[in-house]
């Protein structure tokens, strides 16, 4: 089956006065039809830039410098602007972080909906208005018919995000890119909005790329998760696997940093030493190596590819079955952390 | 909406009363009006009689009340210098000034707005840079210099347009004279209108440009793009409309300034408007004219501001709610 979205070796560069920064480096992933892929990472890891690159709205001077983006098997990263405009909204819907600023304050909600519907579908204004009302009903806005003539400032934050969802789904896209859709919302409405988004996309058979830094949201909502670090893929796999059995040292660090309800309340939280490098100062070799507890010589010299494990795929030399073995104590420590060390396996290190 | 309009109207009346007080004080403190009226050989008895006749011995508040009452009926007394009713003098000059001001305001808007939108949408193009460089000249050159330059080029050297006066005018309705209906009237209007409107045009252009750059960066424009709306709908619907509130404010205030400060342009082009009348009045300490001019300008400003307030409400729904609730 063709993937709804297929990102192949994507590279996004941002030329600046101090040289060209590489915001996304050799990133590949697929989203299957109807699948929800969570994309997590720290601020600046390239989550939002990936989303913008997919929908073709990178803020200049950012540009796609390499790789391919395929939607339903067709390349969309090299489409001419008018053709790309027909993809946006119609085939890919996008939801932004802040519902308070995503809606134009000067237009009625109904007008914004009908304008979007009429841009993508041939129908009468009357039919578009009916569809707009149905959409508002679907996203759970009470008295939808009357609310069509309301302005955005007359809605609460959660209600506005529902309107934003209605707008993103107005032309029944096959993929929805949701960029931190609940970050700006009250905790009490976050769960409602996320489950609404998931249900509507499921009903329509739409795939979702859910960008967030909230592992809780990912764990509840996503089928698979993709962990980014400094614009590169760290690990990708089923949510359950990545959460329970992280294979990349970075993912491992992230998971142990989440406080547990069952643990000792007085225990210090684990943390990953250091911070993510700035785009202009990504270290040689593996981007994570200066902070990694399991690094060995190879990590400083070469860049790891994504290696398969029994559960997920992760970009770490410990998992490269064809690669050189790490020092025995490093391998032992990594195994103790649950990482399936495969490097140097033929010589029996894995036995 | 009605409550909003009424509240603004009451505020406007308050403003007018304060201005009336200031122009009334002009009479009392800028010299003795009796001295201005009479000759050197007038006897003290005659002066006292005149003072009594003019009501100058009444209490101040009674005098002020009378001044306001008369002003409300457009009675501003007799000019000291020209010995004609001030109201008639102003009425004969008002059309010339209003016509010049409105034409230059329309010119400023019609040219400044598209230039601003263009430079905001395409800030990097050569044409945008040219517009910006030109606008810098428009903002930094003083009005009289622009007027003289225009006269030098188009009247003296090229001989295309007249250098002074209003040309032939047509009287409409018995009181309103207009130069818009004759060829010579129209050609006389071009240079002064450009001179007067150039500064406002560059101001509007820079304002619209700044606002466009700002609005185009907002999330709702990005979201509109992400929904696949056409560039036209985004740039001229979603973006331009959001730039309008500050543009309306500035344009409104600038129309007021254009009328008030047409003095310089009218002097350069010998335009027979109120500005020229006012300048002569200042030279001759002709207080009734000065007071009436002050009141009239304040009145026009208040009216324009009132219209601007109503326009806000029409453009931005958030003001509607805020205004009605507050």
Image: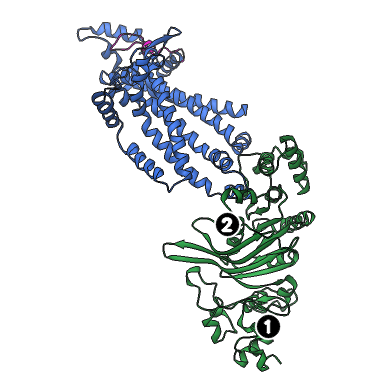
Q: Nearer the viewer, mark 1 or mark 2?
A: 2
Residue B158 sits inside the magenta stretch: no
Q: Answer whether residue B292 is visible to the viewer in this image.
A: yes
Q: Which residue is mark 1?
A: A339
Q: Is residue A215 left or right of residue B313?
A: right
Residue at the image point whose x is 36% and y is 23% from the top: B190
Location of residue B82 in the rendering, given as x and y in whole percent from the top left corner: 29, 10
Q: Residues within 10 Å of mark 2 (few under 14, many from 20)?
A: few
Chain identifier, blue in the render: B
Q: Is residue A240 left or right of residue B126?
A: right
Which of the two discs, 1 and 2, labels the residue nearer the N terminus? Answer: 2
In this rendering, is residue A318 above or below B116?
Answer: below
Residue lying at the far left of the rendered structure: B41
Residue at the image point whose x is 24% and y is 26% from the top: B157
Location of residue A86 in the rendering, given as x and y in whole percent from the top left corner: 64, 48
Mark 2 chain:
A
The tag on residue A78 is 2
Cα gap from disc 1 to disc 2, whole angstroms: 39 Å
Mark 1 chain:
A
Q: In the rendered structure, which segment of residues is drawn in magenta?
A: B72-89
In this rendering, is residue B179 above or below A271?
Answer: above
| Quarter-of-image position of residue A136 | top right
SS majority, magenta: loop
In this rendering, is residue B167 above or below B221?
Answer: above
Q: Quadrant of the C terminus of chain A?
A: bottom right
For the image, the number of numbered tags is 2
Q: Residues within 10 Å of mark 1 (few under 14, many from 20)?
A: many
Chain identifier, green in the render: A
Location of residue B86 in the rendering, given as x and y in whole percent from the top left corner: 36, 12
């Amino acid at each position: 089956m063709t993937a709804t979205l297929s990102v192949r070796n994507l590279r996004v560069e941002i030329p600046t006065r101090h040289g060209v920064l590489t915001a996304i480096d050799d990133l590949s992933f697929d989203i299957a039809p109807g699948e929800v892929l969570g994309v997590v990472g720290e601020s600046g890891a390239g989550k939002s830039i990936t989303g913008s690159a997919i929908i073709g709205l990178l803020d200049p001077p950012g540009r796609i410098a390499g790789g391919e983006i395929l939607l339903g098997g067709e390349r969309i990263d090299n489409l001419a602007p008018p053709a790309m405009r027909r993809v946006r909204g119609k085939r890919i819907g996008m939801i932004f972080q802040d519902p308070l600023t995503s809606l134009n304050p000067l237009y009625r909600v109904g007008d914004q909906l009908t304008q979007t519907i009429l841009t993508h579908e041939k129908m009468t204004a009357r039919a578009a208005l009916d569809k707009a009302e149905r959409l508002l009903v679907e996203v759970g806005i009470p008295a939808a018919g009357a609310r069509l003539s309301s302005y955005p400032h007359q809605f609460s934050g959660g209600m506005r995000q529902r309107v934003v969802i209605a707008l993103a789904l107005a032309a029944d896209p096959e993929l929805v890119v949701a960029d931190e859709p609940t970050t700006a919302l009250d905790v009490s409405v976050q769960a409602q909005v996320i489950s609404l988004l998931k249900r509507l996309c499921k009903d329509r058979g739409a795939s979702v790329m859910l960008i967030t830094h909230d592992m809780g949201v990912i764990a509840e909502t996503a089928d698979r998760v993709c962990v980014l670090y400094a614009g590169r893929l760290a690990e990708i796999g089923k949510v359950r696997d990545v959460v329970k059995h992280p294979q990349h040292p970075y993912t491992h660090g992230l998971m142990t940093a989440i406080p547990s309800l069952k643990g000792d309340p007085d225990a210090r939280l684990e943390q990953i030493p250091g911070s993510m490098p700035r785009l202009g100062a990504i270290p040689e070799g593996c981007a994570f190596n200066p902070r990694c507890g399991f690094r060995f010589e190879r990590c400083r010299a070469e860049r790891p590819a994504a290696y398969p494990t029994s559960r997920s795929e992760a970009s770490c030399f410990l998992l490269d079955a064809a690669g050189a073995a790490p020092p025995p104590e490093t391998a032992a420590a990594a195994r103790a952390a649950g990482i399936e060390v495969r490097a140097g396996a033929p010589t029996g290190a894995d036995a | 909406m009605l409550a909003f309009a009424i509240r603004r109207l009451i505020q406007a009346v308050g403003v007018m009363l304060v201005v009336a007080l200031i122009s009334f004080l002009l009479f009392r403190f800028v010299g003795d009006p009796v001295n201005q009226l009479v000759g050197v050989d007038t006897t003290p008895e005659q002066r006292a009689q005149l003072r009594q006749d003019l009501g100058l011995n009444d209490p101040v508040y009674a005098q002020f009340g009378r001044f306001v009452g008369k002003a409300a009926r457009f009675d501003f007394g007799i000019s000291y210098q020209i010995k004609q009713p001030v109201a008639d003098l102003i009425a004969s000059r008002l059309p010339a000034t209003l016509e010049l001001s409105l034409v230059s305001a329309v010119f400023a808007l019609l040219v400044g707005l598209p230039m601003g939108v263009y430079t905001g949408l395409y800030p990097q193009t050569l044409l945008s840079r040219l517009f910006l460089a030109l606008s810098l000249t428009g903002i930094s050159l003083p009005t009289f210099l622009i007027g003289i330059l225009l006269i030098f080029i188009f009247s003296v050297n090229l001989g295309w347009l007249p250098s002074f006066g209003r040309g032939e005018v047509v009287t409409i309705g018995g009181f309103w004279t207009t130069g818009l209906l004759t060829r010579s009237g129209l050609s006389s209007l071009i240079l002064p209108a450009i001179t007067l409107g150039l500064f406002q045009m560059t101001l509007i252009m820079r304002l619209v440009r700044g606002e466009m750059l700002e609005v185009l960066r907002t999330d709702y424009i990005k979201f509109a793009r992400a929904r696949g709306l056409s560039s036209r709908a985004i740039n001229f619907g979603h973006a331009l409309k959001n730039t309008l509130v500050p543009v309306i404010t500035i344009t409104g205030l600038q129309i007021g300034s254009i009328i008030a400060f047409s003095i310089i342009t009218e002097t350069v082009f010998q335009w027979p408007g109120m500005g020229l009348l006012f300048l002569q009045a200042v030279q001759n300490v002709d207080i009734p004219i000065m007071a009436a001019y002050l009141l009239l300008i304040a009145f026009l400003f208040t009216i324009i501001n009132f219209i601007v307030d109503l326009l806000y409400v029409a453009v931005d729904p958030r003001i509607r709610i805020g205004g009605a609730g507050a």
